[in-house]
Amino acid sequence: MPAYTILRNLAVPKDGAVPKSADFEVMGAATTAAAPPAPVLPQPHVQVDDLSEKDAREAARDPQVKGVAQVMPVTLIAPTDTADAGAAAASSAWGIEAVKANTSPCTGSGIVVAVLDTGIDKNHHAFFGVDITEEDFTGAGNGDQHGHGTHCAGTIFGQDVSGTRIGIARGVKRALIGRVLGAKGNGNSDMIFNGLQWAVSQGAHVVSMSLGFDFPGMVESMVEGGWPAALATSNALEAYRANLRMFDALMGMIKARAELLGSAVIIAAAGNESRRKADPKFRIAASLPAAAEDVISVAALAKSGPSFDIAPFSNIFPEVSAPGVDIVSAKLGGGLASMSGTSMACPHVAGVAALWWERLRSTPGIKASPKLVMDRLRTEARPGVLVAGLDPSDYGVGMVTAPQ
Amino acid sequence: MPRFVVHENPAITVGTHAVIIGVGSYPHLNGGNKPLCEDHEGLKQLTSPPVSARRFADWLIASFNNPSKPLASVALLISEETNVVSGQTAKYTNPKTGAEYDIERALIDNVKDAVGEWKDRADNSVDNMTIFYFCGHGIAQGTDASLLTEDYGANKNDALEGAIDFRRFNLGMLRCAAAEQCFFIDACRASSDTLLENRDYFGLPLISIKKDARRGKPSRRGPVFYAALAGDSAYARPNQPTVFTDALLKSLNGAGSNDQDGDWRVETSRLMDALDYFMQRQLEDGHKLVQIPATGDASKVQIHYVANPLVPVEVACVPDSETAKAYFDCQQGGASKGSRPPGEPKKWLLELSPGNHEFIATYPKTAFKPASKTEFVRPAFRRIALEATS
């Protein structure tokens, strides 16, 4: 039987009745004195069960259940290019200046950042002084055997390495590292749902996810298992749609909780499947989780003289864009490495979001919220620094910009 | 001792006279031991009003302090299971003298007698103050309210024969010489079909309205405190003081006081702030009830003098999510006034005397910097926010 992810809202009683208030006496006509109900906060809970298709449909009828979706493979958004930057990294990472983090008075102080990825090499010099909480959702244990998560974390909050600045928000002193991808960069959709729920419940202000749902991988695996290609594609498509609905449901619950408890800005890489160099029309749309509602999706930019150009691999329909080619950051085991991909652009936006959180929280009269931070990311983005002739479907609203 | 009175100081010729009515048992309403009346409107038996009335009487007798209008008398009527269903005599022990009194039931005739005698006791001087406290079922139409006595519905053809028409009673009290009259109405004000159908009939006024009742007397200051907004419900936890009375007693202990005259006096405008604060604090804890106190006449009266007011203070971190990690400390002049170790996610609640206090948050297990603030604490309440920053 296939594995299904089930998303529940534990705030809803199993019988679907509206929760009653504490046992109070009413000193008058109860029928005409209904008080407006106070909001009931959703309590998202994710579990995985092996179910038949019939049982999955039955589970969906439970009033508590807000989504049932077949478990899908998830993979990191693989860098298109990786190089040891030990010798080449005499200057700071170029993305720091491109998003104007170098001139921002904000550092991300007081902000909690979560990275859902392959884990972290927390002994790396770049993370000295950062209070790091690790949680493994893969079953493989904490730490990073891949290097992708370490690189992404370095771009968000890494301290300078041998005089090279790599971190956008160097004032971040608390990080939540959810390991949702294994040593080979693979995982399952339930790990993402659990990781996201964990990060938000732990008080993350920003969640960065440089990963995507692996639709082709699911089809390939089913075909290898003897499924006809058409049937495998249809099945994978249905699983993708169900996961999209589940992501939207989970984001809806997180958003509802944010009204009272505060919540996080969720940022995801758009993906690297486009091939503009081979064919300018070969542009692939952003996948999950970047395509989900209320997730900021990120395209990658490359340097192009004094301007910036869209990276040839960057998927379309992002909301914002950020540096994603030849990005120098922390290397697994120590030192620096250069990587390219929307995976590298995503942590730039996460870092800038941390700076905006700090700015908004310290502005008198403003109650900082994920919505306000997302608004700043969008409204302060600069399309004018990009090369002429690009389509907004490539870059969204432009290069994200740190508060000045 | 006069009928209904459970505390009296005959030596006081000018002072404060109180009448307290708590009705929990209604034989003709749902769950009662007599035939259910047609106009029951879904109303049930209550356990909180007798508790609330006793607590208010206790507070008046043991704690009330007004040098210019000392406590002269307290009358108490209660209908509860003991004296309504079980057929026994309800008792009340005076907290000051230890004397035990038989309490009469809050039947409309008893209420009428008790209120008339109370009004007469306060009629000897314009310098008197009166306090009227009712806790029980209430029904309303707009701002008009009926306060239901034990025998509401006893006359099946005229249920409101067992009810007080509060608006007319309040106007009737203009006859009373006392120039300061406080009314505390702890009951629902939800709309009633019975009152809607009866239009201008809300029950008995107890004291009828008289034209030019204040001629030759000073104007009356008659603040009215309702437990709920017009049209809304009032609530109580079973066998505990109601939400309103609990807040009232806490407010009278200092949060409702002001020091404009040099000492701390509970006065009506500040009392409203304190009531609202305590009621919202009681109801914010995870359930869905809303109850907002209201006033019908906000004229200023200084009710009670407080030697050492206790001010409710809330301390929390910004952002709230860090509150559980903080070790809180409060100091005044180098002396600790309290502390709380980490682990509790809710706000730190404490009660402090007015004055400058230093509030400190340290974070033993995180990299946050210690935060401190010196704030002047004064009634009605104070909220302290300490930044959690790296």
Image (tube, rainbow, N blue to C red):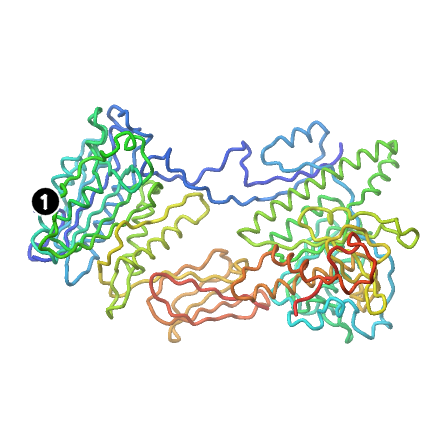
In the shown orientation, is residue B193 left or right of residue B112?
right
- Picture coordinates of residue B236, whole percent (x, y): 34, 42
**Residue for point 7% across, 53% down:** B124
Q: Quadrant of the N terminus of chain A?
A: top right
- Picture coordinates of residue B91, whole percent (x, y): 18, 41
In the shown orientation, is residue A205 left or right of residue A149?
left
Q: Quadrant of the C terminus of chain A?
A: bottom right
**Residue type at tag 1:** Glu
The 10 Å Cα crowd at callout 1, few under 14, some 14 to 19, many 20 or more, is some
- Picture coordinates of residue B380, whole percent (x, y): 34, 61
Residue B11 figure quarter: bottom left
Q: Is residue B261 above or below residue A218?
A: below
Number of numbered markers: 1
- Picture coordinates of residue B151, whole percent (x, y): 20, 31
Q: Is residue A328 above or below residue B280?
A: below
In the shown orientation, is residue A197 left or right of residue A279?
left
Looking at this view, is A224 or A113 the one in front?
A: A113
Looking at this view, is A369 or B5 the one in front?
A: A369
Looking at this view, is A113 or A354 the one in front?
A: A354
Residue A172 figure quarter: bottom right
Q: Is residue B20 above or below residue A114?
A: above
**Residue for point 18% across, 39% down:** B90
In the shown orientation, is residue B289 left or right of residue A39?
left
Q: Which residue is mark 1?
A: B117
**Residue for point 79% across, 69% down:** A93
Task: Tell me the chain of label 1.
Answer: B
Look at the numbered disc 1 and give the secondary structure of its residue: helix
